[in-house]
Amino acid sequence: FMKPFKKLKVEKIETPFEKIRERLFYEEECSMLPVVDDKKRIKGIYFKKDFYYANPSSYHNKPLVGMAVGTGDDDLERVIESLKLGIGIIVIDSSHGNCPPVIEQAKKIVNLVKDRAAVVAGNIADIDGYLRLARVGVHGVKFGIGGGSICTTSSVTGAGTGMFSLTRELSYMRRKMQMKGMNTPSLIADGSISGPGRMVTALAAGADVCMSGEWLVAAHESLSCQENNVRDEYVLYRGMASAGAI
């Protein structure tokens, strides 16, 4: 209504990621690009700020967008569709990653992905779990059971290992595997990262990455839904240990 369609800067759904990024960064007066279909109906929109993080350090030069999946057949269908859309990270998310369903799902997804995205699996709490997931070819392994801000797995099942001890064991195992030329996925500390001291401890013990959703979810840059209370703002979260799921 404000401008004739022929004067609008738009892109088609099938336009490659690289071309869209080039237009947004180098074309004049092009800070956003609506995506339209053949009938000129809007299907989405790209903003220049979305591409600032798509740099050579990103996985295959893609925006770092990840998805969590389970062990069902419908999760494999979601993986296939997400690969078409350019997903960067696929995480097989389970409170017990060293079990046949997770191992089998990891094997299927690694074969589906064929190095088009990073595959992460977990969580594990011993070196056996790391070895089994490494053998199926995942790129990263999440470790730590029961130490998260809302996780109840350790108290309910009695499973779990102290984060420092577990990180040291996995780091030692990883070095031995590297000497043998085996696949050695990145070590991702997940749980018990509730303060800067905990993060330093995990990294010093040998972790490559720390997950700290409790910190990041409350940041203004986060896309999480916020609910205004009388006195404070609350971030809504969903997980199997959340009040909503319970």
Image (spheres, rainbow, N blue to C red):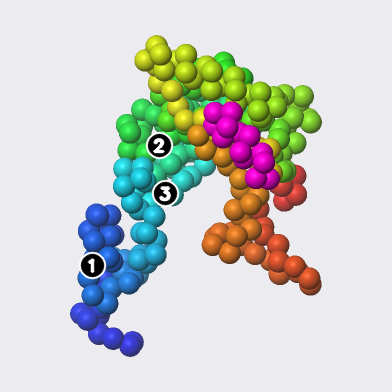
Give residue 163's position: percent from left, percent from top: 66, 29
Inspect the magenta stretch and tell me whether residue 53 lies in it.
no
Mark 1 residue type:
Tyr
Q: Which of disc 1 and disc 2 is earlier in sequence?
A: 1
Pair 2/1: label in front: 1
Give residue 70's position: percent from left, percent from top: 54, 36
- In the rendered image, the vertical position of residue 202 relative to residue 46, given as above or below: above
Give residue 212's position: percent from left, percent from top: 61, 45
**Separation of residues labelled 2 and 1 (CA atoms):** 29 Å
Question: Quick one: SS at disc 3?
Answer: loop
**Separation of residues labelled 1 and 3 (CA atoms):** 22 Å
Question: Quick one: SS at disc 2?
Answer: strand
Evaluate if marks 2 and 1 touch, with contact meaning CB atoms under 8 Å apart.
no
Mark 2 residue type:
Ala
Q: Quadrant of the C terminus?
A: top right
Mark 3 residue type:
Leu
Q: Quadrant of the N terminus?
A: bottom left
| Closer to the camera in the image, 154 or 242 | 154
**Where is mark 2, residue-wise?**
118
Q: Quadrant of residue 147?
A: top right
Identify the magenta region.
195-207
Chief secondary structure of the magenta portion: helix
User: In this view of the protein, can residue 117 be seen by the observer?
Assistant: yes
**Where is mark 3, residue-wise?**
64
Residue at 78% from the left image edge and 30% from the top image edge: 156
